Amino acid sequence: MQTVMNRPHLEEIALRYGEVLRITDRRKYRMPLLVLGVVAYFIASWWFFSIGTVLSRANWSIAGSYLAQWVSYEVRPEFRIGADGTMTLNYGRHSPLGDHPTPDWVVTETEKRQKSQPAPGAASPTPALAAPAGGFMAPEKPAAPAASSTTAAAAAEQTVITHAEVTYDSGTRMILDPGRVTVDHRGETLVIALAGGRAEPVGTLPTWAEQKRPGEKIVLSYGLTGWAEVSADRVVARNRFFGWANFFFDTNSPFFGKPYTEVIGLILSGERLDPKQSNLSLAWNNICYNAEWQHLDVWTKLLQTIVMAFAGTLFACLIAFPLAFVAARNITRSVVLNQVTKRFFDFLRSVDMLIWALFFTRAFGPGPLAGMSAIFFTDTGTLGKLYSEALENIDDRQREGVRSVGASPVAVQRYGVLPQVTPVFASQALYFWESNTRSATVIGAVGAGGIGLKLWEAIRTNSNWHNVAYMVVLLLIVVFIFDTISSALRTRLINRSPA
């Protein structure tokens, strides 16, 4: 039977349960005040940190260029333009294509021209007079034959480029002719006249071209595919390709430029490229000592970082473990010892690991010892505090049970305390080891050694962003592996902990 709730019934319930149904003013306005506080906080942060100004002044094109360099590389053919309009081509000293590049996306037409220059070693046109041998009136000796009085001209042939085409992709192409550069991009055509030491566009510049002042160089932006610079005496084409160039073999390696199938065939059954060692040893040596990527040096620095994190965490655990028993109030019944030890822990962990790294870098000099010491000091304080708190929260019944059978104080700690806290101690130690692998990279950047220092050096050059990406990927792989191992071990330890 359904009861109909009328107004008298509602008033009766309100009088009987008024405290429950009444909504106080604080509860009524709690949510609006909370929302208003959050909005006010974000407005204050936006104003205090000038976020709008920072975003408006940010150079997003440079950020995009840096990001592109992480995953791609450039090939930079440079055309030098002479006074007669002819061109010479140069790819630079450290071109990813080697010393003699012939990419299929650069097509040139050449011709040979005669170049005159003075013949080397031409004799002086004035003959030397022979001195009289027998006195003032003595007959002269016959003079040596005089050289020709005219300068001999030696003709030399010079190969010059009269026409060139650079194809970026199906929608972008640049054509170079004497006195003119024609660019086709996204269905638009731009003609640039090169004369009188000036670069002048024919017509208006499209949106993807920029010239700061008339006659100066024109910068052409093609997006992810690359860009170019056109001036009166030089045209630089920067074509971008996805991937990491020469990752395994640099341009000095005998394996450079060969397909991977051919390289594998040479390693397995090919004739020796170097009589002193096998092709397998030669290939491994070329990979390790790759001049551009420096694999062996990067791997060594990465191993230093791992060892630095492991050693610092291990020594911190060994020191924090006994000190935690002194700091725990229920283990050591001395207020003085408890407080002194806890304040010591506070001192060690109150100074950030980066500050400790700077201090030890000054004391010991740059290297892994400074980084290991910084991790050791910081983690000793943090682990000591965590261990002492875990000891203070143990179940005293187990300890009392061991003590009741007449066990010694050491045996009471061994069988009544350690079984309860060992899984917690080990789990925390594993977590700190995993975390310190990341932290060791940061403190390495301030001179504490390891891959962090090498990473910072690559960033400072502002041109080796592909090396930065390589080291970041290695760090991600190491952290992922250590995180997986640490999580698996912590799970097993926690599941084995006594109920």
Image (cartoon, helix red, strand yellow):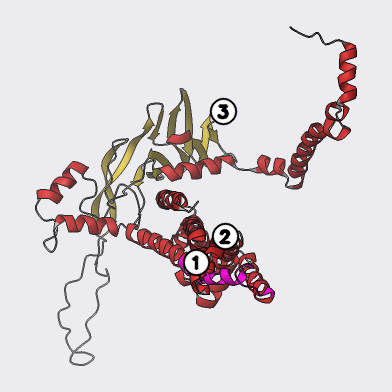
Magenta-drawn stretch contains 329 = yes
The reply, left or right, for residue 9 in relation to residue 271 is right
Using the rendered image of the protein, determine whether residue 466 is visible from the camera's viewpoint.
Answer: no
Q: Quadrant of residue 107?
A: top left
The residues bearing labels 3 and 2 have C-alpha atoms spaced at a distance of: 89 Å
Query: Amino acid under label 1?
Result: Cys
Question: What residue lies at 83% left-to-right and 11% top-to-bottom?
Answer: 5
> Mark 2 — residue?
397
**Mark 1, residues whose alpha carbon is within 10 Å: few (<14), some, or many (≥20)?**
many
Give the x, y percent position of residue 437. Answer: 46, 58
**The N terminus lies in quadrant:** top right
Disc 3, SS? loop
* Relative side of 357 to 437, left or right: right
Percent coordinates x, y for residue 210 in the rendering: 56, 36
In reply to whether residue 389 is colored magenta, the answer given is no
Identify the magenta region.
Answer: 314-335
Q: Which mark is residue 204?
A: 3
Distance (Cα) linking label 1 and label 3: 70 Å
Q: Which residue is mark 1?
A: 317
**Image vertical order of residue 490 relative to residue 16, above or below:** below
Give the mark, 2 or 1, whose residue is nearer the N terminus.
Answer: 1
Name, please, the residue furthest toward the bottom: 135
Residue 380's disc number: none
Badge 1 marks a residue whose secondary structure is helix
Label 3 vs label 2, nearer the camera:
2
What kind of residue is marked 2? Arg
